[in-house]
Amino acid sequence: MEFLKKIFSTKTKDKNMPLPERYPENSAGDFYVENEVCITCGAPEAEAPDLIEHSKNEYGHCYFKKQPTTVDELDRAINAMLVSCISSIRYCGKDKAILKRLYDLGMQAECDYKPEDLE
């Protein structure tokens, strides 16, 4: 698993590497579920039911129906990332505080951008 995290953590828009494709039903914003990576485990949705739900159009694929706007919602979105058994939830934002928090939790592989000052 660590091997895969090292490979995928180098993906950044700045290095002209392709970013993961977002599942089309995701709401616009920094948190998203990667297309065709959900296995319908239900864990992220259980952690943040106000933010994440399963598609009614395509069997079982989860997506962000709403982006976090409060500190509590942000906590739940990050917790949903933590419980995702296959790391299907990603962060494509550039907020340094959020990126630092995700990196401190060992989730750099789930971040689309790597700030210069974070390892």
Image (cartoon, grey):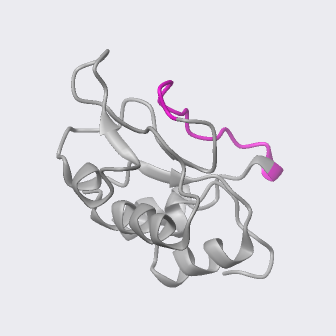
- Percent across and percent down for residue 71 are 54, 73
Q: How many marks?
A: 0
Image quarter where the C terminus lies is: bottom right
Q: Nearer the viewer, residue 18 or 94?
A: 94
What is the chief secondary structure element of the magenta stretch? loop
For residue 72, side relative to residue 84 (left or right): right
Q: Is residue 56 left or right of residue 92?
A: left
| 119 left or right, relative to 88 | right
Q: Quadrant of residue 64?
A: top left
Q: Residue at x 22, y 55 (%)?
A: 46
- Find out whether residue 17 is within the magenta segment: yes
Residue visible at 22% across and 21% down in the picture = 59
Q: Is residue 55 left or right of residue 92?
A: left
Q: What range of the chain is rendered magenta? A: 14-26
- Rendered view: 42 above or below 106: above
- Against 68, residue 39 (above or below) is above
**Residue at the spot 28% in from the left edge and 20% down from the top edge:** 56
Which residue corresponds to the image point at 82% horizontal and 51% vertical from the top-left? Answer: 14
* Residue 90 at x, y percent in the picture: 50, 52
The answer to whether residue 66 is above or below residue 79 is above
Among all residues in the image, which is located at the extreme left? 41
Taking the view exactly as shown, the residue that stands out farthest to the top is 57
Q: Position of residue 103 (x, y in %)?
A: 55, 77
Q: 109 and 25: which one is in front?
A: 25
- Position of residue 4 relative to residue 18, above or below, is below
**Residue 70 is inside the magenta segment:** no
- State the image quarter where residue 63 is shown: top left
